[in-house]
Image (tube, rainbow, N blue to C red):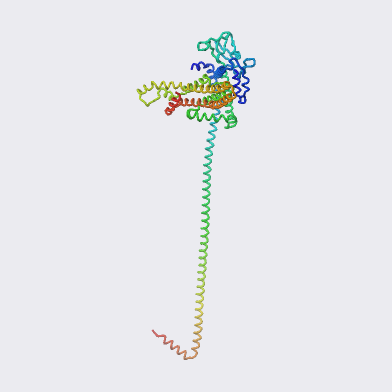
Amino acid sequence: MRLTFVSKILAFSFLFLSAGVFAKESPEAQGDSPEGIKAEINAFIEHHLQDSHDFNLYSYTDEAGEMHHVGFPLPVILWDNGLKVFSSSKFHHGETVAEVDGNHYMLYHSKIYKTNAQGELTFDEEHHPTNAKPLDFSISKSVFMMLVTGLLLFWIFSSLARSYARHGAVPKGIGRFFEPIVLYIRDDIAIANIGEKKYKKYMPFLLTVFFFIWFLNMFGLTPLGVNVTGNIAVTTALAVLVFLLTTFTGTKDYWKHIFDPLGDGMPWFGKIIIYIILVPIEILGIFIKPFALLIRLYANMTAGHVVLMSLIGLIFIFKSWVGGPLSFGLSFAISLIEVLVALLQAYIFTMLSALYFGFASEEHDHGHEHEEDAELAHL
Amino acid sequence: MDKLINEFSAGLFFWQIILFILLLLLLRKFAWKPILKAVEQREEGIRNALAAAEDAKKEMQNVTADSEKLLQEARAEREAMLKEAREIKEKMIADAKAQAQAEGEKIVAQAQQSIEGEKKAAIADIKSQVAELSVEIAEKVLRDQLSDKNKQLKLVDQLVSDIKLR
C-alpha cells in the first residue's frame, strides 16, 4: 500500500508533490498496468472509508518487498461467549490469525470473523464470508477518534466556560473564536426553529451534535485519514438520538398533528377517507425525517472522501509531469470545498434537528404549513 | 443498501451512542450551561447598562431643564426686585417732594400769617398814634381858638344850638 504513504505526504504539504514520490515507486505484485493501479486505488479508497482495528498512519513497502505499517494497535473487545479483550497487533494487519482463549479470529475487510486455527474463511456465492461474526465492541479507529474529539471538545469548551468565570464576561483565547458560533447556534438555529420558550432544553444536544460532527468532519480531512462521520453506524446513532429526543419530548399537539392532522377543519366522515392515506404518511414521516438526516450526512462525507481520494489516485494513473500537478490542483480545490462541506453538513444536521425539535415542542396550531413543506422537501 | 447494511457495525453504533451521551452530559454540565449562563448574564448586563445609560440621559435632560427653569426664575426675580426698587425710589422721591412742598407751604403760610399779624399790629399802632396826634392837634387848635372870649362864647352858642331839646 505505497499509495497510503504518498497520499499522506500529499495531504501534509504540497511541497512534497514532486518527482521524488514517483521515483520511489517500484513495481509490486499487481504491476504497473493501469488496471492494476486502478484496482489498487479502488481497494485503497474502500479500505479508507471503512473503520479499522488499528490506527495506521502510513504503510510502505521496503526494498525487499516487505510491507511495513507505521501506527499503533488499538484494543479489540469481543463478546463471544464471554468478554475477550486483546490488542489488535495480534492480527498483524489482517495477515495472521489471532488466538485468544482457544478461539481463533481473523480480519477480513476490517471485520472480525471466527475461524479455525488456520484462519480459513468460507465464502458464499456473493463472496461474503459465512464464518460466525462475534459481537465486536472494539475501540476501533473511529471510536478512538471519537474519544479524541470528545476530549478535545471537552477541553475547549470547559476552558471557555472557565474563562468566563476568570475574566468576567469576556472570553479569552480560543473561546473568542467559538463563542460566536455558540451564539449563532443559539440565536439562529435553536431560537429560530424551536422558539424562545423551549429552546433551552435542546441547546446542549444541538451544540454537542454540531461541534461533534464539525470536528469529526474536519478530522476526516486531515492526513490522519479518519472517516468517522462518513460511517453509517455513526450517523445512524446520531439520527437515533434525534429520533428519541423528538419522540419523547413531543407535545400533545405534535402527536395530534400526526394522528389528526386536519383537526376540526373537517367532519369525521370526510376525515376517514383522507386519513387512510394521510395518517400512514405522517407516521412514516416520523421515521423518514431522522433517516434523511443519517443518509445525508453519511452520503456527503463519504462522497467527499471518495472524490478527494480518487483525485489523488489520478496522479498514479496519469504518472506524468502534467497530470500529477493537475490532479493535485484539483484535489486541493476539492479539499477547500470539503472544508466548507464539513461545516455545512454539521450546520444542516443541527439545523434540521432543531427544526424537528421545533415541531415536537410546538404547542399551538400555526406552523403546520412549515411542517408540510419540510416533509415534502425530504420526501 | 445491501452494502450499507453489511457495512453497519453494531460495535461502533454502541460506542457512538455511549460516547455521545457521555460527551453530551459532560459538556452540558461543564461547558454549555456555564457558557450559556455567562452569555445570558452578559447580555442581561448589556441590556441593563443600556437602560441605565438611557435613564441617565433622561435624568440629565431633566436636570438641564430644571436648571434652566431655575435660572429663568432667578432672572425673573431679579427683574422684579429691580422694578420694585425703582418704584420705591420713585415713590420716595415723590414723597419727599410732596413733603417738602407741604412744609414750604406751611412755612409760607406761617410767614404770611405773622406778616398779617405784624401788619395788623402796625395798623393798630398807627391808628392809636393817629388818634393821639389828632387829639393833640385838636387840643392845640382848641387852645388856640379859645384864647379870646368871643370865640369861646360863639362856640358855646354853636354847641348850644346843636343841642336841640327833644
- In percent of the image, x 54 and y 16: which residue is there? B11
Quadrant of the image occupied by residue A136: top right
Front one among B8 and A305: A305
Give the percent coordinates (x, y) of residue A86: 59, 13
User: Is residue A146 among what the camera can see?
Assistant: no
Location of the N terminus of chain A by quadrant is: top right
Quadrant location of the C terminus of chain A?
top left
Q: Foreground residue, A290 or B51?
A: A290
The number of discs equals 0
In the rendering, at what x and y percent does residue A373 appear?
43, 27
Tell me if residue A289 can be seen: yes
Q: Position of residue B136 (x, y in %)?
A: 51, 83
Q: Which residue occupies the foreground of this view, A19 or A176?
A: A19
Relative depth, front residue between A69 and B27 = A69
View extreme (right): residue: A63
| Picture quadrant of residue A23 | top right
Question: Residue A360, percent across and down?
Answer: 46, 25
Q: Quadrant of residue A163?
A: top right
